[in-house]
Image (cartoon, rainbow, N blue to C red):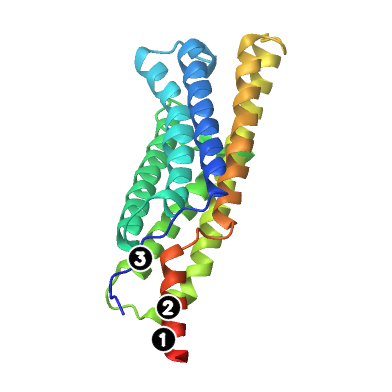
Amino acid sequence: MSLNKPMAAISPSMVPLLFFARVSGLLVAALVLSWALLFQSSFLPHSSIPTQEDKLYAVLHPLFMVIGFILISGEAILIHRWLPGSRNLKKSVHLCLQGVALGSGVFGIWTKFHGKDGIVANFYSLHSWMGLICVCLFGAQWLVGFLSFWHRGEVRMTRAKVLPWHIFLGLYTYGLAVATAETGLLEKLTFLQTRRNVFKHSPESMIVNGLGLGLVVLCGIVIFTAVSPKYQAVHSKLMYLSDTRCLSS
């Protein structure tokens, strides 16, 4: 029997899911970039005269939280579905991408602490507290995953027990991140329409609503792809049938 591990083939049913995940991810990235670059004044506080540095940090928050945190963490979830190669390679890429997403989330929250009003003033809404809880849970999940699946002292039985919880918490945290972004979009759009006379059918309102819908679609595709039956290991099945025939003969 060959000792080499067979390379798993991607199931044909995964191809359209991965394609639509990429398309929805690109759409979300394009919408948040358009919103941040074309409507920079919408992110600035109205209570004081903003500086150029305030404008920069205000625009960086949605970019880091949507592109850096949500999109990259979603791609890290999909890594196990499409990346060819060994299991250790997939785990390494997954760990690195999740680390980049965690760093983006931490920096994205830090940009909100940069304001002159201080830290406490930025925690007044459901969106603020959900974001803090989400990033903290994500960091704890990343640390536990690193210690459980990369620490050489852990036995296989321990990792087998941790894996279902690791998957559940990973998908839960990803869904929580998208839900947090939706509350932030709703909060910002409500403020713009009531305080700054942004019309409901204005281009900015359409971009924000489109961004919210795009995030919902992307979240559904990523989670559905993650929980779908795994790709078929064609070579493994052939080897199993061959071994079975040899034993029966």
- Which residue type carries mark 3? Pro
| Marks 1 & 2, CB-CB < 8 Å contact | yes
Label placed on residue 6: 3
Q: Image height check: is 29 above or below 9?
A: above
- Label 1's element? helix
Query: Of tags 3 and 1, which is closer to the observer?
Result: 1
Rendered residue at 53%/21% (across/down): 31
Is residue 5 left or right of 118 when viewed as pictured? left
Residue ID for mark 2: 242
Rendered residue at 68%/22% (across/down): 190
Considering every residue shown, the one lying at the far front of the view is 249
Q: How many marks?
A: 3
Residue ID for mark 1: 246
**Residue 48 pos. (x, y %):** 48, 13
- Which residue type carries mark 2? Ser
| Marks 3 & 2, CB-CB < 8 Å contact | no
Q: Earlier in the sequence, mark 3 or mark 1?
A: 3
